[in-house]
Every structure is written in C-alpha cells, then in structure tokens.
Image: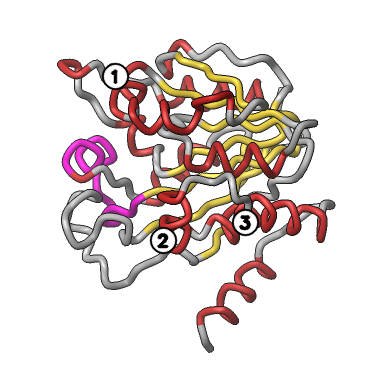
Amino acid sequence: MDCSHAIFALLLLAPCENGGGEIADSAIADSLASPARLEADRETDALRRPDLVLEFFEIEPGMTVLDLFSGAGYYTEIVSRIVGENGKVVAHNNEAYLAYAEDGIAERYSGDRLANVEHLTAEANSLELPDNTFDAALAMLTWHDFYYLDLENGWPDIDEKLVVRKLCSALKPGAVLGVTDHVATAGSEAETSAQNLHRIDPQRIRKDFSDSCFEYEGEINVLRNPDDDLSQPMFAEGIRGQTDRVVYRFRKKLEQPE
C-alpha cells in the first residue's frame, strides 16, 4: 500500500462529522495558495502537511478557533484564511513564547495582515477564555511544553489538568481539539522527555484529554517518521522538522457527566 492510500484508509477509519465537505477542502486549498503567505511558510508546508492536518481537524469557514501557544503563527495564519472574515482566530502565547518568536510575530502581523486574529497573552495557568465559544482548538507541537519548566527564562510550572478544564469550558459541545506533537519513547516520563528533548509520549497526550470532557477520535499518520530513533531533541541538527510526530483528534463530548 503506498503512502497516499494509507493516509486515505486512516481517514476513513476515524469518525468524522465534518459537514463542510468540499467547501472546507476548498477553503484550506485557497488558504495555502494565497499569494499573501510568507515564503518561509510555503517552504515549511511539505514538512507539516497543513492540508491534511487541518482537514482532519475539520477547520471550516466561519469558525472561531483557539491556537494555543501559537508562537510565530504559522498555523494561525493558515487558519485565519480558512475561517475567513466571518470567523476568528485567537492566537495565544505566554511572555516566553512572545520573546522567543518576536521576529516572526513582527513580520507576520505587520500592517494588520490578519485582521481576524485576536492576540491573547497569558500564562497557561492564568488563561481566561469565554465559556462555550470555540468551534475548535489547536495545540500544535506544544503539549510537551505544558510539562516543561524553566523559571530562569520565564517558563513557569504549568498545571496541565487546570488547562484541560479551561478548554472544556471554552469549547462548544462537539468541538474538535487537534493536537500534534513530537514523539518520545513509550513509557517515558512527560516531565523528563519535555525537559530534555521537547518531546512527549503519545499515550500521555491521550490520557490527559481522554480523562476529561474530551474523547479520543482517531489519528492520521501523515507526520510519522519511523527513522527517528526518538533520542535526540526535536531541534537537533538532522532531525529538526522531520521528527516522528503524532496527529490526534479529540472531540468535546456532547453530554457532560454530572
């Protein structure tokens, strides 16, 4: 079975209630083809496959989407063009991320390029999100950061369970939570792999969200790399941009337990 057929089969196996169909697919294609996109983003597309990832996450025109730890905004921009003028993207960062991605942020948002993007700066534990607002939320290559700690450089201890509860309140029933991240060795401690490698055991991700208001729906293997031995930090020379990465879709349950 070639790669394209494998991807198609995986998509069929995962439950999908995307009513946007061809309209959503067209919006994703139009967003990626926009001549206004930054050239560096276009060069990154082949490594991140946003076409397949955002289709799997059911991002559609008119949505309100939260981009957690959006960094310099690679995905924020793509999603902002998909949701269009009737939609909105909330691009979240904390102070440390703002400093890390300062140059990229300045370039991306100069001249009010993305008018439907609202910027939210807050430490994760202090996030204040309106209830029942978001049609989707994205945590793109960032969930491991919820287990990272670097007080000297402004990265505080994060209560990941608290953040999950905040997301449960902020997302609408049936909303999608999309997560991608760099894979760590199975069974490894999240704090250790995040601290040393900026990676996380995929089972940790699944447990964090499946123990809450979210249910795991499926994954696609478009970013998996069996040649990654999982031993190097994600930014190491030779593996950066080509790490073994999971793409998980969760959905907020329609009925919440009492």
Is label 2 or label 1 in front? 2
Residue at (60% x, 16% y) in the render: 129
Residues at marks 2 and 1 touching, judged by CB atoms closer than 8 Å = no
Count residues near mark 1 (Cα–Cα under 10 Å), then give few for <14, some for 14-19, many for 20+.
Answer: some
Is label 2 or label 3 in front? 3
Q: Based on the displayed image, in which of its 4 quarters is residue 95 positioned?
A: top left
Is label 1 or label 3 in front? 3
Q: Is 55 covered by the magenta stretch?
A: no
Q: How many marks?
A: 3
* Amino acid type indicated by mark 2: Leu
Query: Which residue position holds label 3?
Result: 33
Q: Based on the displayed image, in which of its 4 quarters is residue 220 positioned?
A: bottom right
* Amino acid type indicated by mark 1: Asp
* SS class, disc 1: loop
Please, is residue 135 above or below residue 231 in the view? above
Residue at (24% x, 16% y) in the render: 154
Q: Residue 80 got which mark?
A: none
Q: Based on the displayed image, in which of its 4 quarters is residue 145 positioned?
A: top left
Residue at (48% x, 45% y) in the render: 38
Whole-percent x, y for residue 105 in the image: 42, 28
Q: Which residues are magenta?
A: 182-196
Q: Nearer the viewer, residue 190 or 244?
A: 244
Residue 61 located left or right of residue 229: right
Count residues near mark 3 (Cα–Cα under 10 Å), then give few for <14, some for 14-19, many for 20+.
Answer: few
Query: Which residue position holds label 1?
Result: 157
Please, is residue 50 above or below residue 1 in the view? above
Whole-percent x, y for residue 218 in the image: 59, 57
Q: Residue 47 got which mark?
A: 2
Q: Nearer the viewer, residue 91 or 35?
A: 35
- How far apart marks 2 and 1 lie (CA) works out to 30 Å
- How far apart marks 1 and 3 lie (CA) works out to 39 Å
